[in-house]
Image (spheres, grey):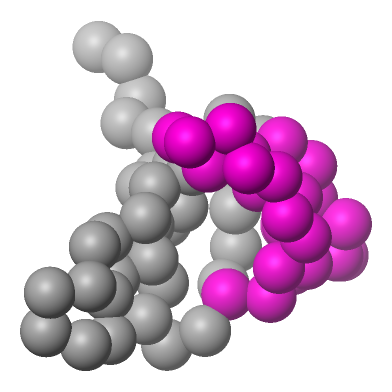
Amino acid sequence: MHATVGERLIIHGKLVGQATRRGEILEIRGEDGGPPYLVRFDDGHETLLFPGADCEIEHEQPAG
């Protein structure tokens, strides 16, 4: 997984009824855009995480 600061991380719920969590990547602590990532979720909670199979990154679209 490769990310840049400012992109959005989405964690999909694993169980029926479990909410999807969304957050902004604040820091990249791995090499070449790799994890771990410091993420601030929409509820204000911040955590350092290694994304799993239930995660995806919304990559920024180039302008133009």
Residue 52 visible? The answer is yes
Using the image as rendered, state which of residue 36 and residue 43 is in the foreground.
43
- Left or right placement of residue 59 versus residue 6 in this view: left
Residue range in magenta is 26-51
Is residue 48 rendered magenta in the image? yes
Residue 32 seen in render = no
Residue 30, horizontal then vertical, whole percent: 86, 65
Can you say whether 5 is above or below 22 in the image?
above
The single residue placed furthest to the left in the displayed view is 16
Hey, which quadrant is residue 29 in on the image?
Answer: bottom right
Between residues 6 and 45, which one lies in front from this camera angle? 45
Image position, residue 59 (x, y; %): 40, 44
Is 41 placed above or below 63 here?
below
**Residue, x 57% and y 75% (percent of image)?**
51
Q: How many marks can you see?
A: 0
Q: Quadrant of the C terminus?
A: top left
Q: Is residue 63 above or below residue 58?
A: above
Q: Nearer the viewer, residue 6 or 21?
A: 21
Indicate whether residue 53 is drawn in magenta. no
1, above or below 5, in the image: below
Side of 47 where 25 appears, left or right? left
Q: Residue at the front extreme?
A: 17
Furthest toward the top, the residue is: 64
- Judge from the rendering whether residue 37 lies leftward or rightward of residue 14; answer left or right: right
Question: Residue 57's x, y, as percent?
Answer: 42, 56
Quarter of the N terminus within the rendering = bottom right
